[in-house]
């Protein structure tokens, strides 16, 4: 790859890395010729993604650096800009504060939605004392996160949106073949992809769908759940989780997810708390109607209720069942049209556009 300018140096300080993060950084390398030093926490055991090779990106394990060594590493690198995950890692904060003193742009990732509770008001008040000395920018996911960012002491001109972009290419590439197959025989299968943790709502989903099946209201639809996590065995072995029309497929590598989604007919994410949810964009890109709870932040960009899916109240089983019934009762041809709109919306924000924003806003040239 021929860089478009002298190779910029970028430092990325992350918590957990997922393939979509690397897709965005790959796009930045392709656009700018950047050389990226990526420090990240260990891969989560509940989502052991295979990260693959990424020319232009050097991966580092956070455990290999003390805070002092990390600071020395950053000072020696002298990056053109720094992207860091929030304010959890104090070592990351020290680096960003030092870079900020040198006039180097530093951007904080923010995917926490503003809820307006006492804890957030206190955090916001305290953050105003140190945030401008640590970060020059805040990169938020959506409008709820921007509402939080505006309370943290930086001017609105320094707040970016669109922090997360799915690795859209494999899903968009799989869409056309999946659509042709759905035209021939539409798959009556709900798909749910998430870690089995309390906030994702798998037990609620299984309870709601199993009850519809037992009352003869689910037609010939089935439910497949993908993922693992602390509640996997508990949900899988619950009365509803063992229902014969519910399948728990376990963890699936990112490279294999498009094939799984191609066999599905609608996506459902009934999260009780979901600041964003990149999975929503992935499922939209492959042309699935979307059923989301009102706690899912990504709904603001990828769901048009009544057009390409439906919204239900988080934690409300009856409301979730009404959403499931809307899909079950929708003719296949209409489901296909709903999926087409999902695919259009999913393609509106890509790693390439993410890289363009990073280049134009953060990269000092």
Image (tube, grey):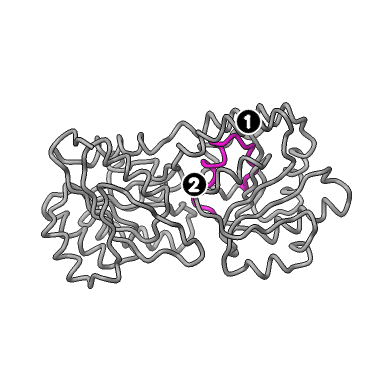
In terms of secondary structure, where does tag 2 sit?
helix
Rounded to the nearest angstrom, the CA distance separating label 2 from label 1 is 21 Å
Work out which quarter of the rendered image holds the N terminus and state it: top left
What residue is disc 2 on?
278
Q: Is residue 281 magenta?
A: yes
Looking at the image, residue 178 sits to the left or right of residue 122; the answer is: right
**Name of the residue lying farthest toward the right:** 216
At a point 11% along the width and 53% down the height, the residue shown is 102
User: Which label's residue is closer to the chain start, 2 or 1?
Assistant: 1
**How many neighbours does mark 2 have within 10 angstroms: few (below 14), some (14-19), or many (20 or more)?**
some
Q: In the rendered image, which quarter is residue 362 located in? A: top left
Tell me which segment is drawn in magenta. 274-293
Looking at the image, residue 204 sits to the left or right of residue 256; the answer is: right
Badge nearest the viewer, 2 or 1: 1
Q: In the rendered image, which quarter is residue 96 located in? A: bottom left
Out of 12 and 172, give the one closest to the viewer: 172
Work out which quarter of the rendered image holds the C terminus and state it: top left
Looking at the image, residue 365 sits to the left or right of residue 279; the answer is: left
82 shown above or below 47: above
What residue is disc 1 on?
179
Residue 126: x %, y % from top left? 32, 62
At a point 68% along the width and 52% down the height, the residue shown is 224
Residue 160: x %, y % from top left? 33, 41
Residue 296: x %, y % from top left? 56, 48
Residue 79: x %, y % from top left? 16, 51
Residue 55, labelled with which disc? Answer: none
At a point 25% along the width and 67% down the height, the residue shown is 91
Q: How many marks?
A: 2
Q: Is residue 342 magenta?
A: no
Looking at the image, residue 184 sits to the left or right of residue 60; the answer is: right
In terms of secondary structure, where does tag 1 sit?
helix
């Amino acid at each position: 790859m021929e860089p478009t300018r002298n190779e910029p140096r970028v430092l990325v300080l992350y918590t957990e890395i997922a393939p979509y993060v690397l897709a965005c950084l790959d796009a930045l390398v392709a656009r700018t010729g950047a050389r990226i030093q990526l420090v990240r926490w260990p891969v989560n055991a509940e989502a052991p993604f295979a990260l693959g090779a990424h020319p232009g990106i050097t991966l580092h394990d956070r455990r290999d650096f003390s805070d002092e060594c990390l600071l020395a590493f950053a000072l020696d690198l002298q990056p053109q800009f720094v992207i860091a995950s929030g304010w959890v890692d104090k070592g990351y904060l020290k680096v960003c504060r030092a870079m900020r003193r040198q006039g180097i742009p530093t951007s904080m990732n923010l995917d926490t939605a503003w809820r307006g509770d006492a804890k957030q008001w206190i955090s916001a008040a305290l953050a105003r004392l140190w945030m401008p000395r640590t970060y020059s920018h805040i990169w938020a996911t959506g409008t709820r996160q921007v509402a939080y960012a505006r309370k943290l002491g930086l001017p609105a001109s320094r707040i970016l949106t669109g922090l997360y972009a799915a690795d859209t290419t494999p899903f968009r590439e799989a869409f056309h073949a999946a659509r042709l197959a759905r035209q021939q025989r539409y798959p009556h299968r709900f798909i749910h992809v998430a870690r089995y943790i309390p906030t994702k709502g798998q037990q609620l989903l299984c309870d709601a769908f199993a009850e519809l099946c037992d009352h003869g209201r689910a037609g010939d639809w089935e439910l497949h759940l993908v993922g693992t996590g602390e509640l996997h065995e508990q949900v899988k072995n619950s009365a509803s989780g063992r229902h014969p029309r519910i399948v728990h497929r376990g963890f699936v590598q990112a490279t294999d997810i498009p094939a799984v989604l191609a066999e599905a007919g609608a996506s459902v994410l009934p999260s009780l708390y979901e600041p964003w949810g990149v999975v929503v964009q992935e499922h939209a890109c492959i042309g699935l109607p979307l059923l989301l709870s009102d706690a899912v932040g990504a709904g603001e960009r990828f769901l048009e209720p009544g057009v390409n899916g439906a919204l239900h109240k988080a934690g409300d089983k009856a409301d979730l069942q009404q959403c499931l019934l809307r899909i079950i009762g929708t003719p296949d041809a209409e489901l296909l049209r709903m999926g087409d709109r999902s695919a259009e919306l999913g393609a509106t924000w890509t790693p390439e556009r993410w890289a363009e924003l990073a280049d134009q806003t953060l990269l000092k040239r």
